[in-house]
Image: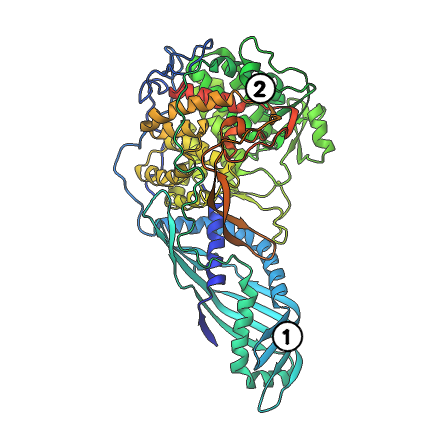
Amino acid sequence: MSFFAPRASATLAFAAALLILIAGCSGGGSSGGSGRAAPASPPGGSPGGGSTSGGTSTGGGSGSGGGATAGSPSAPGASLGGPPPGAVVPPAPGAVEAALNAELADVWDALRPGLQVRFLDELRTNLVGRHGSSTVEIEVIDVSRVRFDIVAPPGFLAFTPDRVELRLPLTGTWSIEIDAEVVIRGSLLGWTPSLRLPLTLRVDDLSLADAVDMDLTDPERPAIRQVATPQVTSRISLASSNTLASVILQLLSPTLDREAQRLLATALGTLTPSLSSLGGFPGPGIPGDGAAPLADSGAATPFEEVALNVGRKMVSDHMPFGQVMNAEIDAAAGDSWVDAYRNGGPGLQGNVVRHHGGGDSAIWTGHFLAAAAFRYAVTGDPEALDHVRHALAGIGHQLDVNGATGLLAREAAPEASVHGQQLVAQGKVFRRGQINGQTWVGSQGGYGVSRDQNLGVFFGLILAHDLVPDPAVRAEAARRIQMILDYLIAHDWLIDEDRPSFDGRTRGGFPTYWLASVQKLAFLHMGERVAPGRYGAEIAQTSPTVGGLWFGAWTSAMGLDHYYKFNLTNVTHFNYFRLETDPWRWQEALRAFRIVRRYVGHHRNAHFDLIWTSIEPGARADFFPSARESLRRFLDRNHRQVAPPVVDLSNVTYVAVPQVGYASPGTGTSLTSNVQQLPSEPLDFHQRDYTGHFHWQRDPFTPATPNAGNPFTEKSGLDVVLPYWMGRFLGAF
């Protein structure tokens, strides 16, 4: 028996689940290269720099603007602002799909065992009970066994900006066999039998296919134009080990076939999201859309004094063993960054009792390394070089504690240290290693090391390599980049050794992987930068996946949830665009990045805005002043992780904004749209939430709660030093 059925809610949902899988990890032409030609010095007055006297320091020396100073170190590989030269040559037809399908197959092989466990539970739950019509009813009493053959991976038949077409599996078919104890009640020639018997339901030649057409009227805000009629094909058979039952099954075959189809639909229906009525999705719901960049007030602000003093404070009080953490202080404080850390200010006010927040230490240590590299590039200050070396050593500890294999730890400390003993007492130790004759302990956190941590480290390492012409620094940065990159390549870009096996029931042990990810290509370009010729083949293999980057950008720009994703995107693209050598890849990556920029470009975020000006120099006239004013207002906030006693929101206007949600309630998944009341434009800085390591990865629409937080927790100050020194490098300050 075979059938065709338009099972939209199940079939399209299978497709959506896999597309979301790709979106969660986002993130050709030539085989890559070693980076474009370097200018003689970091860009400042050229290109698009110029003097920026408004709002500069009253005592720190940032009034000259212009980025690099005379005699400052050169910045190899720091070419910014504009695509690489050459013709745009897209890959051959089908190359994008082939590259995406190859990556998807690897991830499918890793996830399939855990997913099958979950599917088995879902099938049992969905099947037990009564199914059927007034003619024939099948009541499933118990499901004793379910066997899957879903080895063949899903894949894309088309993946272009205007159409995504998916087939499960890509080639061949799947099969499912279900053994159950059932009661069949029916009507046969006036006879109404009720039989309890063993029944085997077998589904062969199962395949599911669907397509989504996109509306590109606004290429920076794509929307679903329509979903095609989904196609499900299969061949279903019913059998029983009971001889009498087999005869009855033959007599009832036409009716039972229809009920078996319904039974299959029920079994599959809630395993995946329902995507009915998604035309126009995700809609125009962009919070604060249209908010203008801030104007530079010109108020005298000691930017550089504060940045220098905060940087010193970070090294002395927030970086035990070279790794950035928050610090618990024995005295409360409520003054602002500018009052505490300008020259003559009271500074830290108290003594460090302990450190915490080390689970994200790798990403923030990498960000600090980047800030120190920017500082050295524009000042040549020996203290900046010391800070580079300090952070570089911290990243080295996070790798060496795991045996220098390339597996990055989230944090590491000597076991005998106070922090090391905290990790032991909290049960957070993953591995012990010998470093310089000492036993160190490393932690991978509760879920293993993430893409975020690796990205932060790569961000800092490549900038240290490119902006700090100290031979030892460059050699160490290059060695660590290759160490991590070789590990990722050897493990097919999937990390699972530092967590339990993936359990589809609980979603515990979910691996870290890169799929259709701009991070992956950025990392490879960094490797090729420090070791020319070594990673060319990997770049060539990965290159066509750039054609799929738009999808990850599109899904990330559906809502404010997990706002840190936008920091990851911006940080990735800062280095990607300056190192990319292929015009087609550069163009496709920019198409994707513009989708994200459309969503966050009006959020008055100094960090994001400066990165945008490195990609689009024409934006400097608007966003250099806005970045200065954003940082100026941020410096008026408390440097402790606590909100003020009064948060005045009387000037805030709230508007209804459609937002997209994605939920996994346990019995399935769902994509939903809801309307939220949000501020009509980004909140002013004194009104925003005060929690978190890095202010620039917190959404600007969540208001602070009066007195919420801890006045004894000192923020590291990374949100001061990184935008300031990046801004100096680019010419904004």
| Residue 130 sits in quarter | bottom right
From mark 1 to mark 2, how far is it between C-alphas? Answer: 67 Å
The answer to which of 356 and 113 lies nearer the viewer is 356
Q: Can residue 34 be spotted in the picture?
A: no
* Callout 1 secondary element: strand
Precedes in sequence: disc 1 or disc 2:
1
- Pointer 2: residues within 10 angstroms few (<14), some, or many (20+)? many
Rendering coords of residue 295 (x, y %): 39, 23
Q: Quadrant of the C terminus?
A: top left
Q: Is residue 576 left or right of residue 675?
A: left
- For mark 1, what is the residue? 139
In this picture, is 399 found above or below 508?
above
Q: Where is residue 375 drawn, in percent x and y?
A: 46, 17
Which kind of residue does numbered mark 1 sit on?
A: Glu
Label 2, on which residue?
314
Q: Amino acid at mark 2?
A: Met
Colour scheme of this structure image? rainbow
Which label sits on residue 429? none
Of residues 291 and 480, which is closer to you in this image?
Answer: 291
